[in-house]
Amino acid sequence: MTVAVPPEFPVLLRLIEERSAAFRAAVAAAPDLAARVPTCPEWTLRDLVRHLGSVHRFWAATVAAGPADAPLPETAPDAPRERTALLAWSAESTGQLLDALRESGPDRGCWTWWGTSQSPRTSGAVARHQVQEAVVHTYDAQITTGTGQPLPDEAALDGVDEFLTTCCAGTAPWPHEPAALDCHATEGHSWRLTLSADGTRATRLTAPGTTPADASLRGTAGELVLALYGRIPVDSLKSDGDRRLFDLLLAWDPEEDE
């Protein structure tokens, strides 16, 4: 069993650019931007474009601002409604994010919402999370237009680790009975999430754990990412143990329990 290693900073930037372009390609092919997004039913496809563009602009400004104790104020997106103009606005938004990340480099500090997680509060960690933002929303757009594709391996393999270390692991007390949850990617990578009142810890496994997990999920890395982000049902993956624990995990917001 091999250990997943996060991509280098230039690779993260390339993945943001590639996935954002794939996102816009799916939107460009859509018959109607008013179509509802099945994986985000409260949004239309136009809403999805506005959301991702606003996210790119927010993080571009956040990275450019450098270390900070509080987030910058969010502003309403100034996105146009007409498709060609909206796609141009989206491309400009991605460009702002990439320019800010290139200017900052991977190690510069900045505000992040993952204050006490295992992920650092750096522009490199922002880039890593923005890969997943673009990957998952590209999937949303493709599903809406009937052109759904598996997640790219390079992004998906890091996506499981990034989700566990950024969105789950940290000092927030787990509000349920202590548990150990494993995720196994069929590509040969595995992770363990240990949850307790003392906090949550994500670990990359180099060999099968000597202590059995209370629950485990197995699928391709892409399937695991989509399940963790609520895009496909956890029940669609092979599981062992108490699968209800994954439902509790995905319903939990550690930031609220800090």
Image (cartoon, grey):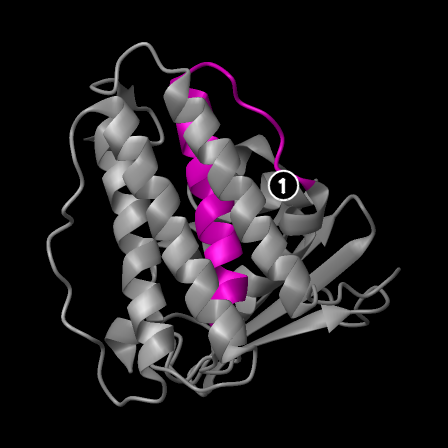
Q: Is residue 72 above or below residue 234?
A: below
Quadrant including the C terminus: bottom left
**Is the magenta region chiefly helix, strand or loop?**
helix
Identify which residue, 54 or 229, lies in the foreground.
Answer: 54
Identify which residue, 8 or 38, lies in the foreground.
Answer: 8
Q: Counting other residues with Cα less than 10 Å from the Cα at mark 1, is it few (<14), some (14-19), or many (20 or more)?
A: many
Tell me residue 168's x, y (percent).
Answer: 46, 68
Task: Specify whether residue 217 is in view.
Answer: no
Q: Residue at x 30, y 47 (%)?
A: 53
Q: Residue at x 54, y 74 (%)?
A: 124
In the visual, does 7 lie left or right of 236? right
Q: Residue at x 49, y 49 (%)?
A: 228
Kind of residue at badge 1: Gly
Q: Is residue 248 above or below residue 43?
A: below
In the visual, does 85 lie left or right of 149? left
Q: Residue furthest top?
A: 31
Tell me residue 35's x, y (percent).
Answer: 25, 17
Which type of secondary structure does the marked residue at label 1 adopt?
Answer: helix
Quadrant including the N terminus: bottom right
Q: Is residue 8 above or below residue 248?
A: below
Residue under numbered circle 1: 222
Q: Residue at x 55, y 84 (%)?
A: 107
Q: Is residue 161 above or below residue 174?
A: above
Identify which residue, 3 or 26, lies in the foreground.
Answer: 26
- The stretch in magenta equals 125-152
In the visual, does 75 lie left or right of 211? left
